[in-house]
Amino acid sequence: MNEPNHIDELLRQRLGDNEVPPPTFVWPNIERELRRRRRRVIFWWMLPLLAGSTLWAVWEYRKTDQSHFMQTAAHTTNINAVADQSNSSSNAVSGSENTTLPSTQQLQKDQSASNPIQQKSTPENIHDEPVWRVKSQLKTTTNQGEFTSKGGGSAAYLTKEETSAVENQNLNAANTSVVVSSDQATMNPASDNTALNTDAALLNLALLENRQYPLLTLPIDLKKPATYSIAPVAPPKRKKVAHNCYDFHRNPNAWLTDVYLGPSLARVEMVSLPDDRPYMNQRLSTESSMFAATAGVRVSRLIQRHFLLRSGIDYQYWQEKFEYADPYYVKYNIVVTVIGGVQHIDTVGIDYGDRYVRTWNRFGLLDIPLMLGTEFRSGRSGFSLNAGVTFNVLFHKRGAILAPDGQVAYFTPGKEQEYELFVPKVGMSASGSVQWFYHVKPKTRIFAEPYIRQLMRPVNVADHPVRQRYTMTGIRLGMTRILD
Amino acid sequence: MNETDIIMGCLRGSSQCQRLLYDRLAGKMYAVCLRYARSKSDAADMLQDGFVKVFTKLDQFQFNGSFEGWVRRIMINTALRTYQRQRFDFESSGYEHLPERPIDPDAISNLSEAELMRLVTKLPDGYRMVFNLVAIEGYSHAEAADLLNIQESTSRSQLTKARRWLADQVENMSKVNE
């Protein structure tokens, strides 16, 4: 215990309750800091709101899009009736039953007063309701980081007798620990856990001399005698700025630039009405994903050491193989001879061969992403969680597909008899990623960033019987430079 | 307005009440910060950080005991945290060999508060921290040692040295004033 000393007493009396007017600039600084903290709280509330709104918009859009598609298809003519007509005419050529589908144009020309879907809703075929094959729902997430504050104990004011009793206790090493509100955790969410127990110790050291100061009681086992013991308090650890790390404490708001590229996978999801399903299956069997890649540059603004606002330019490329062999193509080899002015045509051979087409369909999307993210660091490495939307600027496509009429159709823009299959721009996509990074130098990082991106609209024009939607997944490998 | 009303107003976010609270306590708290700080600018920073903590953590005050004491705790904690980040050393000042001698109370009475404050501020960092915690605030050596992450024996020796240093300074100043 401290032995009372007269100089201590003298100085305590003179200086203990001394008042000195503070500098005039202190209060405006305090006001400014309080306003800044209030704005930050509002920002935190906006993030889940933004994420929720994005998810809701995606869900609503897809629901509306599918119901619109179903309504549009319900007004087309009786597909079965026209298909029967086509099949009977093609039988004369091949000698066998032909299941070639009618072209979309033919269907649209037919007059029908009734809804073909409703026509099918008879008791015997009531199970033929349209069943939509829908896959892969993208969930966008944002991550906010964590704030923790803990409270414990209870405040109590000790009487003089109680404080004397406490004074006489043995204040050796504790078997209890105290947790109090962590002001540090709230003020600086990324900072180290400075002195939670220091706060506790200070506040609990209650000035056992009945000094009118509040006392936070320790959590006490009531069955045991009331012994107050205080855990050794670890001093706050100063977080060292590791070698080759950028000191974000010094500059919590920084600009970052990324360049990246990497392989990816473009997965196509096709949806159609039941009557169009054979055509959809033909398309699925003739088209296959090949190579995909992404590249881009990005600018990010780091705010308060953890929050990121990202934008830039992203290019996504993917390639598909279209391979089609028409099994019903017949080639007649004939020889024409002219004898005495008379043409003689002799069929010298019939090839029941293939008309074979193979093309590499190529697609490119140039987009502007807008992402929100949050970043966590430990030493030289760290990770960030990002989510947001991407706005398409350019949709480049070239290649061929099997059209509904069974013919190979080229959709390359500018090509003769271009088949209008795709929309000019694919609109908005939702995207999310997780980035792992490592500081190779204080201002330079390398990173790997797996991502997923879902195009929210089908890429086909509205009157195409198959709706085609893409999901891209891949990994971005790149480098970040912190601009200071 | 009484203190409770002002605190409730601050909890509601009233800027006017926050200013009233600040005006009531800033003088005393600045004096506390001056005793712990190396300079007036450090003391102003501590005061600013401390009051920001007070206003952001005000909902944790449970109206048990003195509000001024609660605020004082926060100021001291802020001061200690500031210097613990900077890692000061506990110095030797060459006074170790001198025996502790009593000081004339009149010598201290003859000095103004400002002069006494200046003396305390001039103490080397280690002496000053221990002296403020033990001699003025009333912590035990064990408690002060825990807060400052030093041995209890170091706390005792630092306090002894601080007293010797202060006694010497007070005596010198008294001689000058005579």
Image: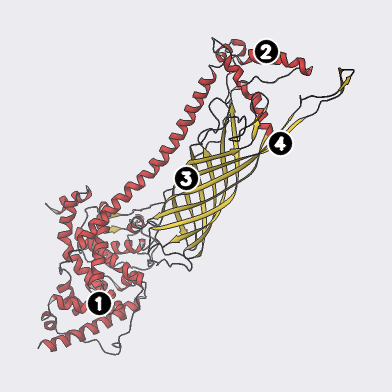
| Amino acid type, residue under disc 3 in the picture | Ile
Residue at 61% over, 13% down: A125
Q: Which numbered circle lies on residue A3?
A: 1
Answer whether residue A227 is visible to the viewer in this image.
no
Cα distance between the residues tagged 3 and 2: 49 Å
The answer to which of marks 3 and 2 sits earlier in the sequence is 2
The answer to which of marks 2 and 1 sits earlier in the sequence is 1
Cα distance between the residues tagged 2 and 1: 112 Å
Q: Is residue A289 above or below residue A237?
A: above
Front of the two marks 1 and 4: 4
Do the numbered discs 3 and 2 sit on residues whose CB atoms are within 8 Å?
no
Cα distance between the residues tagged 3 and 4: 33 Å
The answer to which of marks 1 and 4 sits earlier in the sequence is 1
Label 2 CA crowd tier, 10 Å (few <14, some 14–19, many 20+): few
Q: Is residue A157 above or below residue A294?
A: below
Q: Position of residue B4 (x, y in %)?
A: 16, 51
Answer whether residue A255 is visible to the viewer in this image.
yes
Instruction: For the N terminus of chain A, give its image quadrant.
Output: bottom left
Q: Please give the chain letter of the residue carrying mark 2.
A: A
Q: Which numbered circle lies on residue A358?
A: 4
Q: Are marks 3 and 4 on the same chain?
A: yes
Q: Is residue B61 left or right of residue A57?
A: left
Residue where numbered disc 2 is placed: A85
Residue placed most toward the observer, A336 or A57: A336
The answer to which of marks 4 and 2 sits earlier in the sequence is 2
| Amino acid type, residue under disc 1 in the picture | Glu
Residue where numbered disc 3 is placed: A368
